[in-house]
């Protein structure tokens, strides 16, 4: 199962990230996880929020370039070797991970890893075959 | 040193008479042999007999760069093709190039005015001229070459670029004169220091710099770093190439070789001739050119004239160093760049917004052009490398068209200021 990530284009200058956070907070949207990739010129903010559709609308009306990206959320045991196992599995089947980032839920024992994979369907099959659970949007929201 | 005191120091009355005679002859030829000019003169209701002296020049039509392009390649030829011995053209980056076709006599004139130019900065027959202007269709290289040959100096025709070799030859051959763009000279100085050479101890005594706008402060820098006299020179392909005007050792404006090139300053919007001292667009008529003579060419360079006799003894009119341009053409590292060209390239890339901005800066003495392009939904990707690819693609396309490296920067939507009238596309941060 895949979940919706919101990706936002940010110019690499002061206050832009704060502007996104403020925009979302005004709408009472909670950011669950985030990662920021950047170059000298610009950055791409990737966020997992509790209401992706609403977030997209809000960001766009505030003039941001944003889009929904389908990503996979995998539960990983929060201990040494947890992440390694998943990567091994994907690597064995030559699945390339474009990028990933993780977050730890305070109420749970497991960490959650967000993976951006081009061939998402195949990755999901491989993970399933190897008994690795992926989270649905509902499940993620319920956390 | 004054190469030709007869003409460079001719009294103003004699000069005017000479100019009037040459103009009369020129108009006769143009009216008879160049349909382009006959049509223009007929349209303006002026006949060759109306031109009795240099003051009558105001009755004649102007020539623009666009018109010169329209009659490419041979439309301005005033002699048969067999009399042409050499052809140069402008870079042609904006489309059709402008052609300058020289007869043997024109090359003689070119050598003469370039000999005057190099002499004005002290070049003599014992000097070794390192000519780092590009050789080829560009007029800079061969112009300096002919002038140095006329003087009897030794020319090192190294052409542009190849910095390490420039320094090695400068050191080994003990060059005394450097000719290149001002920005390149400072780049050379920097490269010299990196190699442990003191530019001031290379033995140069003068440098002839042109082909791009530069400032008094940059002159100060060049003079200090190399310990040279830095001379500003002016010319353009449409007229002859370098050799139109040059500073003397007093560096108080550029002496126009007025017996060959007649200068006027006009109000660019009305076309009215302005009095000396008033800023306006420089207009030049080639009084002595045979191959492709040009009548009242609108240079689009903004300057003003001073006809007072200079401390050096020359009586020729002096133009102030070019103050700006009437259009928005940018000169980046000596290459003419029009915003319209950049626009054309950018807009060919699928999904790009027609909002862009050009930022010109001078870093490490070299011009840098940054092209800002707005991000939008259709271009956006959550993957950095896709976005970087957009930047690289546009940079490559721009290089293919302009032949200069640019920096493309993706910016947020609506972050480029919109204008209701003429868009302000260019932010020139160079301190000129």
Image (spheres, coloured by chain):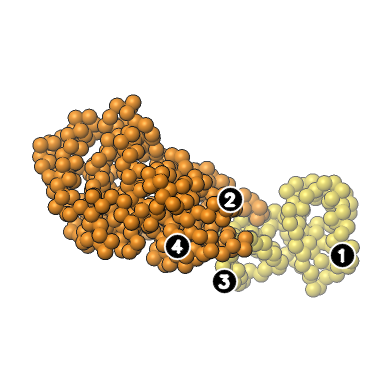
Chain colours: A yellow, B orange
How far is the residue under mark 3 from the one under mark 1?
36 Å
Which residue, given by chain and number where applicable, does mark 4 sit on?
Answer: B228
In the figure, B94 relative to B256: above or below?
Answer: above
Residue at mark 2: B165
Q: Disc 2 to disc 1, how far (Cα)?
A: 62 Å
Which element carries disc 1, helix, strand or loop? strand
Expressed as whole percent of the image width and height from the top left, the position of residue B35 reads 23, 30
The crowding category of the residue bearing disc 1, from other C-alpha atoms within 10 Å (few below 14, some 14 to 19, many at least 20), is some
How many angstroms separate mark 4 from mark 1 (CA)?
72 Å
Q: Position of residue B415 (x, y in %)?
A: 48, 62
Instruction: Classify residue A105 as left or right of residue A52.
Output: right
- Could you tell me which secondary element the residue under label 2 belongs to? helix
Foreground tag (3 vs 2)? 2
The answer to whether marks 2 and 1 mark residues whose Cβ atoms lie closer than 8 Å is no
Which-is-in-front pick, marks 3 and 4?
Answer: 4
- Label disc, if present, on residue B330 of the rendered structure: none
Residue B393, given in percent of the width and then of the height, sits at: 58, 47
Res A15 label:
3
Tag 3's secondary structure? loop
Q: Are there few (<14), some (14-19), or many (20+) residues within 10 Å of tag 4?
A: many
Chain to which mark 4 belongs: B
Total marks drawn? Answer: 4
């Amino acid at each position: 199962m895949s979940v919706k990530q919101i990706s936002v284009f940010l110019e690499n200058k002061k206050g832009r990230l704060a502007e996104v956070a403020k925009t979302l907070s005004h709408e009472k949207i909670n950011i669950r996880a985030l990662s920021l990739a950047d170059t000298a010129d610009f950055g791409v903010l990737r966020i997992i929020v509790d209401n992706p559709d609403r977030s997209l609308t809000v960001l766009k009306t505030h003039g941001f370039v944003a889009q929904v990206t389908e990503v996979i959320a995998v539960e990983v045991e929060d201990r040494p070797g947890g992440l390694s196992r998943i990567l091994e599995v994907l690597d064995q089947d030559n699945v390339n991970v474009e990028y990933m980032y993780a977050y730890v839920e305070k109420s749970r024992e497991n960490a959650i890893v967000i993976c951006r994979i081009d061939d998402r369907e195949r990755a999901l099959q491989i993970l399933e075959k190897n008994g690795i659970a992926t989270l649905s949007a509902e499940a993620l929201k319920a956390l | 040193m004054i190469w030709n005191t007869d003409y460079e120091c001719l009294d103003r009355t004699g000069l005017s008479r000479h100019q009037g005679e040459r103009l009369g002859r020129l108009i006769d030829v143009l009216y008879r042999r160049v349909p382009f000019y006959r049509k223009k003169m007929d349209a303006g209701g002026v006949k060759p007999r109306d031109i009795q002296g240099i003051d009558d020049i105001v009755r004649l039509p102007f020539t623009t760069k666009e018109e010169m392009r329209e009659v490419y390649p041979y439309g301005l030829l005033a002699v048969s093709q067999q009399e042409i011995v050499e052809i140069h053209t402008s870079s042609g980056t904006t489309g059709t190039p402008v052609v300058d076709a020289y007869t043997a006599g024109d090359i003689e004139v070119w050598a003469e005015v370039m000999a005057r130019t190099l002499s004005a900065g002290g070049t003599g027959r014992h000097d070794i001229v390192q000519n780092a202007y590009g050789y080829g269709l560009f007029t800079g290289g061969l112009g300096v070459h002919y002038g140095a040959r006329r003087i009897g100096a030794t020319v090192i025709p190294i052409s542009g670029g190849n910095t390490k070799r420039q320094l090695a030859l400068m050191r080994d051959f003990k060059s005394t004169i450097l000719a290149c763009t001002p920005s390149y000279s400072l780049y050379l100085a920097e490269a010299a220091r990196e190699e442990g050479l003191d530019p001031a101890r290379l033995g140069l005594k003068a440098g002839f710099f042109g082909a791009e706008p530069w400032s008094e402060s940059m002159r100060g820098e060049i003079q200090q770093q190399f310990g040279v006299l830095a001379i500003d020179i002016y010319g353009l392909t449409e007229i002859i190439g370098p050799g139109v005007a040059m500073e003397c050792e007093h560096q108080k404006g550029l002496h126009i070789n007025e017996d060959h090139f007649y200068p006027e300053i006009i109000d660019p919007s009305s076309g009215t001739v302005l009095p000396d001292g008033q800023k306006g667009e420089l207009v030049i008529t080639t009084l002595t050119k045979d191959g492709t003579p040009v009548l009242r060419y609108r240079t689009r360079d903004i300057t003003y004239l001073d006809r007072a006799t200079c401390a050096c003894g020359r009586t020729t009119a002096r133009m102030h160093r070019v103050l700006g341009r009437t259009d928005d053409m940018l000169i980046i590292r000596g290459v003419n760049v029009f915003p319209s060209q950049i626009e054309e390239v950018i807009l060919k890339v699928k999904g790009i917004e027609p909002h862009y901005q050009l930022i010109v800066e001078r870093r490490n003495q070299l011009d840098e052009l940054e092209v800002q392009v707005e991000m939008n939904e259709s271009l956006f990707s959550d993957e950095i490398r896709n976005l970087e690819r957009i930047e690289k693609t546009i940079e490559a396309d721009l290089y293919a068209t302009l032949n200069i490296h640019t920096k493309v920067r993706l910016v947020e939507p609506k972050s480029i200021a919109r204008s209701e009238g003429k868009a302000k596309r260019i932010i020139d941060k160079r301190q000129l």
